[in-house]
Structure formats: C-alpha cells, structure tokens
Image (cartoon, rainbow, N blue to C red):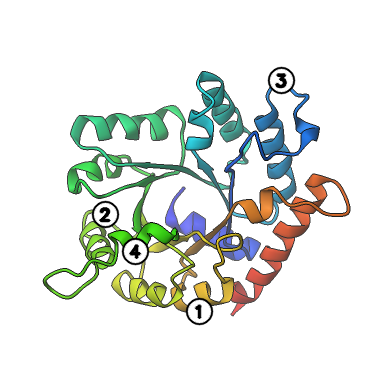
Amino acid sequence: MTRQQLVENIFEKRSFLCVGLDSDPQLIPSQYHSFNDPVFEFNKAVIDATQEHCVSYKLNIAFYECLGPAGWVTLEKTLEYIPESHFTIADAKRGDIGNTASKYAKTFFEYLHFDAVTVAPYMGRDSVLPFLEHTGKWVIVLGLTSNPGSADFQYFRSAEGRFLYEEVILKTAGWGTAENTMFVAGATHPEELAIIRKLVPEHFLLVPGIGAQGGNLYDAVTHGRNNDLGLLVNSSRDIIYRSGPGTHAQAVAARAWEVKYEMEGFVKS
C-alpha cells in the first residue's frame, strides 16, 4: 500500500485506528475454544467487528510463533482474511544484519505479503536497509516505545545532547523516505511525540499505548499529527478482549466504534 492510498483511506473512513491482534489463547473467550483453531476464529470475529472502524491491523508475531507450526498456519489464515483495503503490519521487531535481515524481509514481504514490518535498528543500517529494498513495502523503526523499560536506554544522551531515540530517528529517516518508513512513538510519552514530529515532520508514526497502557488519544494527536494526519494509533487489549452486555463481537464492535468516533473529529479538523 502506498502512502497516498493510506492517507486516502484515513480521510475516507475518518479513522486512523490500527487494531492489534495480540491474540492469546489463554485470554480469548471460552466460546471460541471448541473450534479446531480457536485463535483464528477469535481473529475472524474481531476483524468482522472492527473492519469498518479501522484502517489497519497489526499482528504481533510472538503470539503466533509461540504456538509452533500451527501458529504460523493461524497467522497465514488471519492475514488472508483481512480485507485488502486495510494496511497490515507484522509486529516482529526483527533486528539482524546482512543476509539474515534479507531473509526476514523475504518472510514478511514475499511469503506472507504484509504491508509493513517493525524493525529494531540497534545493529545499524545493515539491519534496516534490506527491508527497504522491497518496493511498495514499509519499514516501521522502533523509535520511542511505550513500555516502562524504554527509559533504560532510549533516554541516553549523545555527545550532541540529543536522546538516543532522537539519534535513532534522525539517522534512520535518512535511509528511507516518508513513503516507506514509519516510526514507533509511544502514546505514553506525549511531550516527546512533539519532539519526534519536529524531527520527522512528513513521516507516519505508529502510536501504541492507547487504552490499557494509559496513553491518551487527545494528547497523542495534539502532539503527533501532521498535515496528512500522519498517525496510526494502535489499540489491542482495549478492543479485542472487550466484554459487555451483548456478545463478545458486539462489545468489540462497540469499543472500536467509540475509538473511531473520537478520531473523526481529528480527521475533519
């Protein structure tokens, strides 16, 4: 999917919601346990309930890898079930060099046909450039993550006085373009989102941390948007494990609609 197509989808749907399919067999409702592939049936229900409210799906690869070969089958089936109109992200956080990085890129872009993959840039350009060689695909670089441990390394100061996350974003932005590179920027750091937006004014940001992790949508958009909106805001647990007075699917749809409704005002403004 091109940048222009993604932008058009966001403004047409008036949503920049990315639903995270971090589907844990231990957490999915019991109604799905009788199926041969409970995780896939759960994912199908979530996709059916949310596709009109979101523009993207992010599959956390760890939740499928941990199930062994059967998990990869579930992953493939889920990816095939997602409508082609939606931007698909492999949340794999791969970070290796040279030929190994090329194989990871081949896995997610040529075999599984994801639109994007998250990449850990710690090993430098060798670990990122092989992903950028794939035309029409996106690399999402870990910039400033939403987890508490982000403070362990990402706030180290460089000799120039910048934080490590700033150096990572500035450096990797020069390896690709705003047409094929995004950055992870956690909603739990709203003030830093403003800093990141100044560093990369044209790039898309993938923003996790809304909902269960305590991030605030208003602050994330206020500090992180650009002229094209330029954000994909991810919500996983807050949507996919929703419960309510009706069925699981009805509760999921209702929560996705609530988030989308809140987003509409930002897209129109």
Mark whose residue sits in front, 1 or 4: 4
Calculate the distance from the C-alpha at mark 2 to the C-alpha at mark 3.
42 Å
Position of 128 relative to 98 (above/below): below
Calculate the distance from the C-alpha at mark 1 to the C-alpha at mark 4.
23 Å
Looking at marks 4 and 2 on the same chain, the residue that comes earlier in the sequence is marked by 4
Position of 36 relative to 115 (above/below): above
Calculate the distance from the C-alpha at mark 3 to the C-alpha at mark 1.
44 Å
Calculate the distance from the C-alpha at mark 4 to the C-alpha at mark 3.
42 Å
- In the rendered structure, the answer to whether residue 83 lies left or right of residue 198 reads right
- In the rendered structure, the answer to whether residue 87 lies left or right of residue 253 reads left
- Amino acid on which the number 2 mark rests in the picture: Gly
Question: Which residue lies under the disc numbered 3?
Answer: 36
Q: Secondary structure at mark 4?
A: helix
- Picture residue at 50% right of the left edge, 22% below the top: 68
Q: Secondary structure at mark 3?
A: loop
Q: Mark 2 Cα within 10 Å, few/some/many (few <14, many 20+)?
A: some
- In the rendered structure, the answer to whether residue 203 lies left or right of residue 165 reads right
